[in-house]
Amino acid sequence: MSAVLLAVFNEYGVADRVRTRLVGDGFPTDRVELTASCEPGRAALHPAASARARFAQYFLTLLNEDEERPFVELLV
């Protein structure tokens, strides 16, 4: 299993700059994701009735341990 680093930003622009910097520093582009309401990324691929439900399903794939699940509601 590969490691996952999850960061939460209040501003989309800051998150976008961090993504650009990570790629610039050598992280493969297919391994750096930005998920936001304006750019849902892989969350948009989840089958669900609403955007909120798609985000919840997506974050559950990353935060799937019992003690991590409360964070899903905070993120969606």
Image (cartoon, rainbow, N blue to C red):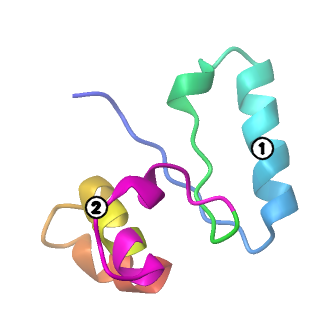
Amino acid type indicated by mark 2: Leu
**Vertical order, 2 against 48 (above or below):** above
- For label 2, the residue is 63
| Residue nearest the observer in this picture, 44 or 26 | 44
- For label 1, the residue is 18
Question: Is 58 positioned to the left or the right of 28 in the image?
Answer: left
Tell whether position 62 is magenta: no
| Residue nearest the observer in this picture, 20 or 43 | 43
Name the residue: 26% across, 65% down. 60
Question: Is 30 positioned to the left or the right of 37 in the image?
Answer: left
Q: Which residues are magenta?
A: 39-54
Question: Is 39 positioned to the left or the right of 49 in the image?
Answer: right
Point out residue 13 in the picture as x, y percentages from the top left corner: 87, 59
Q: CA distance from mark 2 to mark 1?
A: 21 Å
Name the residue: 36% across, 77% down. 71
Point out residue 38 in the picture as x, y percentages from the top left corner: 70, 67
**Vertical order, 10 against 1 (above or below):** below
Tell whether position 45 is magenta: yes
**Vertical order, 2 against 42 (above or below):** above
